[in-house]
Image (cartoon, rainbow, N blue to C red):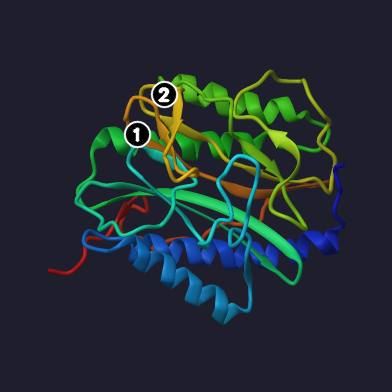
Amino acid sequence: MIELKSAEEIGRMAVAGQFVGELLAELSGVAAVGVNLMDLEHHARRRIAERGAQSCYWDYAPSFGRGPFRNVLCLSVNDAVLHGLPHDYVLRDGDLLSIDMAVGIDGWVADSALSVVVGTPDPEDLKLIEATEVALEAAIAVAQPGGRLGDVSAAIGDVARSYGYRVNGEFGGHGIGRTMHEAPHVANDGRPRRGMKLAPGLTIAIEPWFCRSTDKITFDDDGWTIRSADGSRTAHSEHTVAITAAGPQVLTRRPTRAAGSADPTTARQAPA
């Protein structure tokens, strides 16, 4: 069942979305060469507790994972792209890190993800990250009232192909609101002018993710971490978006970086 949200309810989701966007931006700055993934996890736990928010990941046990999930972040490195378990791993120069999180505040949820390179970036990694970000913005742009869900999916697939990447159809975006995963499923490829009509009040998480040289995936023995089947690098971008009469409203926008600051896809190096 798809629940359309009122303007007031979207406003409450936006509160959660602002926090998620701010914390993701903060975490992307903390990520650096020499930082342990568990440091990022505990940093996020502390911030979530300070805000009085609730992680949507903690104790989550969906059919596709080996639950319960006992972390507040998904941290996926290099060839890992989705649902990466935080673990004792120290980030190295050139690592590509995807950070995904979903938080609820006062009963309303927001979900977002980004990818960054720590230390010295490989241009091909920056291209891969850029492709997910461009695809996300293209999908948001066509998420207009009266449009179709297929428009959103087709926009993602078109961008992927324009960059030379293939699209995996097993995991994509989803409805969101009172819980993290609601109907409808938002595929990362599709046909325009097909699928359900986009009505004001629909809230969805749009999340393109691509692998550099394959559309096939494998699962780690932990039952959660999803990797590219050929070991190639991966990237993931996501926003929570509300369809309104005036057009798409992004609820998880991150703070705008100051002029002259570093590229947000390249995280800082740890001090020597």
Q: Residue furthest left?
A: 272
The image quadrant where one finds the C terminus is bottom left
Q: Which residue is mark 2?
A: 163
> Callout 2: helix, strand or loop?
loop
* Label 1 neighbour load within 10 Å: few <14, some 14-19, many 20+: some
The residue positioned 82% from the left and 29% from the top of the image is 196
The residue positioned 71% from the left and 25% from the top of the image is 150
Is there any visible trace of residue 148 in the rendered image? yes
Q: Between disc 2 and disc 1, whose residue precedes?
A: 1
Tell me the kind of residue under disc 1: Lys
Q: Would you say the residues marked 2 and 1 are in contact, meaning their CB atoms lie under 8 Å apart? A: yes
Say which mark, if any, is on residue 83: none
Q: Is residue 244 left or right of 267 when viewed as pictured?
A: right
Q: Position of residue 221 (x, y in %)?
A: 42, 41
> Callout 1: helix, strand or loop?
helix
Q: Is 39 or 256 nearer to us in this picture? A: 39
- Residue 205 vs 255, above or below: the answer is above
Q: Which residue is mark 1?
A: 127
Tell me the kind of residue under disc 2: Tyr
